[in-house]
Amino acid sequence: METLNQLIHYVAQNGDYIWEQFYRHFLMTFYGVLFASIISIPLGILIAKYGKLSSWVLAIGSITQTIPALGAMAVIMILLGLGTNTAIVTLIIYSILPITQNTYVGMKDVDKTVVEAGYASGMTRFQLLRMVELPLAISVIMAGIRTAFVIGIGIAAIGAFVGAGGLGAIILTGTNATDGTAIILAGAIPTALMAIIVDLFLGWVERKLQPIKSSKSKAA
Amino acid sequence: MLEFKNVTKRYDGKTAVKNLNLNIKKGEFVCFIGPSGCGKTTTMKMVNRLIGISGGDILVEGKNIKEQDAVELRRSIGYVIQQIGLMPHMTIKENIVLVGTLLKWSKEKKDQRARELLKLVDLPEEYLNKYPHELSGGQQQRIGVLRALAANPPLILMDEPFGALDPITRDSLQDEFKKLQKELGKTIVFVTHDMDEALKLGDRIVIMKDGEVVQADTPDEILRNPANEFVEEFLGKDRLIQGRPDVTTVEQIMENKPITVPVGTTLRDAISIMRDKHVDSLLVVDSANVLKGFIDIESINLNHKKAKVVDEIMEEGIYTVSHHSLLRDTIHKILRRGAKYAPVVDDNQRLVGIVTRATLANLVYDTIWGDGTELEELTQAAE
Ligand SMILES: Nc1ncnc2c1ncn2[C@@H]1O[C@H](COP(=O)(O)OP(=O)(O)O)[C@@H](O)[C@H]1O
């Protein structure tokens, strides 16, 4: 009860600050996933087309995933110093695997006969990609982005250690304060909330992007 | 229209198609058939450059395909595959006019073309806004065919297009498509492994083995004169037995002396001819022996008071068959119409003979019990 009162008190007094960090946290994750997508989607397409590269790329990706995020961030900090950039680069690294992997799987799952039909109808490689393969793979790719985003929100919370700010900074303040449970919660609850909202929202987007529609649902 | 000149395809050392020479005329329906791996698909796919040629030339409407842009070439040639390959994320309309989209047609043109094409296969217009998975397999392949027709290409390549359908659907699609092909005058290259399909659809059948053409002829010619044992075996013995009626013409089995009366014969004379010859109807011909109609005992009975000569009461527009039409086409027609007989006429409508149900009965008897050799073969096959 005591903690709850303290939490309400803290939130009431620092509402703007929490909101600011919430926004910052979100943006950091967003940029990380965005840049990762810019790298990973073409990479996934490439390895789906040139099979030989795929095992290598996916293996390297898996290895990065096993390194603890805090350790990776420390290493990157040596290169880039303190600040938001270090956090974003870490986020990019951790987002590359799920997005690349899903792009790869999504592209591989596109029915070969549909691709052949498109090609034989006179599509250029680019048209095939834009009109057939990407639309059919997009929801799987989106699932990868969703995974990356939710993981990213957790990683961004660590960003506070390298001075990137975000909700992690509030949590850090709480751990340093005596009796700081309420402050920790004031950082942790919005973080969890953000993860849930983003997950639900991107899940919805993913369903919207389902390529195989039915005429009835469209009419309704 | 489509010319293969010494076409060869090698896959690292292995020759899939050897020195293929073939000339396909405009509007011709050519079926490629042969055992699996004989190179028929490879041959077909070289035409729209899905597979590159190792040697020789292919000419489409006189133009060497090597000198054309591959993408444009493909847009100008229809393509239908067994797995159908409709775009699952596009509506039926978008699927039908896919090539139109690639050719940057206006929206109006695409709408109009889609509607026009859908009519050809008797599907209702609501289908335009459906998605492929909402259609049955047969309907999907109808759309697959329409997609190939959309940009009105003179040439269409088909890779076992009806192979995955159930027999009844396949049969009706074959009929529909053959009719459509005739109407639209398309040239078709059709790959199949089903001999019945090839015999039914093809104007010409190209039988291949190990990358080479063994025989390229009309279905009748192939049934009549298989080039070698391989073709015979490929046709199957039963089919050669059945094949007899396939190459028999009506002329060979008809009765040569139908009972006729000239125009102007009185009813009284007609009746006495019927009585003498033990028949209940007579064919009426003019002086040049051109068939005019027929009279039967019923109509004489009903009209003998009013009419004097056969011309007045004879029925015209009688169903006839041509003397060189094939028996296999004729038998079904006669039986299906429930006609007692069919007069046989030559090209000038002159009466040359008659096929009666009794003639058919004799024929069936001969085919089944015949001279004994066929029966032996049948029993051997059964064992
Ligand atoms: N991509 C390929 N690489 C190597 N060999 C191939 C390839 N495609 C087909 N072949 C070979 O070429 C021959 C002809 O194949 P294909 O034209 O598909 O036969 P069909 O359609 O008559 O069954 C086969 O022996 C097949 O193994």
Image (cartoon, rainbow, N blue to C red):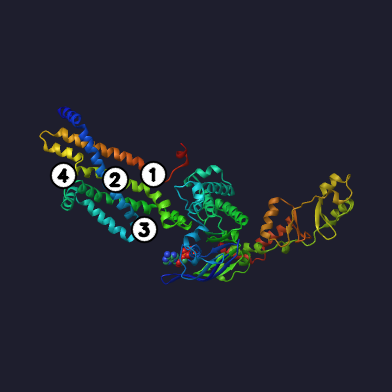
State ligand 1's quadrant: bottom left
Nearer to us of marks 4 and 2 is 4
Residues at badges 2 and 3 in contact (C-beta under 8 Å)? Answer: no
**Label 1 sits on residue:** A209
**What residue do we see at 79% from left, 51% from top?**
B316
Instruction: Tell me which label, 2 or 3, sits earlier in the chain.
Output: 3
Per the model, the C-alpha gap separating discs 4 and 2 is 23 Å
- Residues at discs 2 and 3 both on one chain: yes
Say which quadrant the N terminus of chain A sits in. top left
Per the model, the C-alpha gap separating discs 1 and 3 is 23 Å
Instruction: Tell me which label, 4 or 3, sits earlier in the chain.
Output: 3
**Label 4 sits on residue:** A161
Instruction: Give the quadrant of residue B355.
Output: bottom right
**What residue do we see at 39% from left, 44% from top?**
A209
Query: As drawn, which residue projects farthest toward the left?
Result: A178
User: Mark 1 — on which chain does it sit?
Assistant: A
Residue B225 position within the rendered picture, expressed as x and y whole percent measured from the top left: 62, 69
Instruction: Tell me which label, 1 or 2, sits earlier in the chain.
Output: 2
Q: Nearer the viewer, residue B373 or B78?
A: B78
* SS for dot 2: helix
Q: Which mark is residue A147?
A: 2
Per the model, the C-alpha gap separating discs 4 and 3 is 40 Å
Per the model, the C-alpha gap separating discs 2 and 3 is 24 Å
Inspect this view and state whether residue B262 appears: yes
Q: Nearer the viewer, residue B141 or A100?
A: A100
Specify the amino acid type for callout 2. Thr
User: Mark 3 — on which chain does it sit?
Assistant: A
**Label 3 sits on residue:** A49
- Residues at discs 1 and 2 both on one chain: yes
Specify the amino acid type for callout 4. Phe
Specify the amino acid type for callout 3. Lys
- Residues at discs 1 and 3 both on one chain: yes
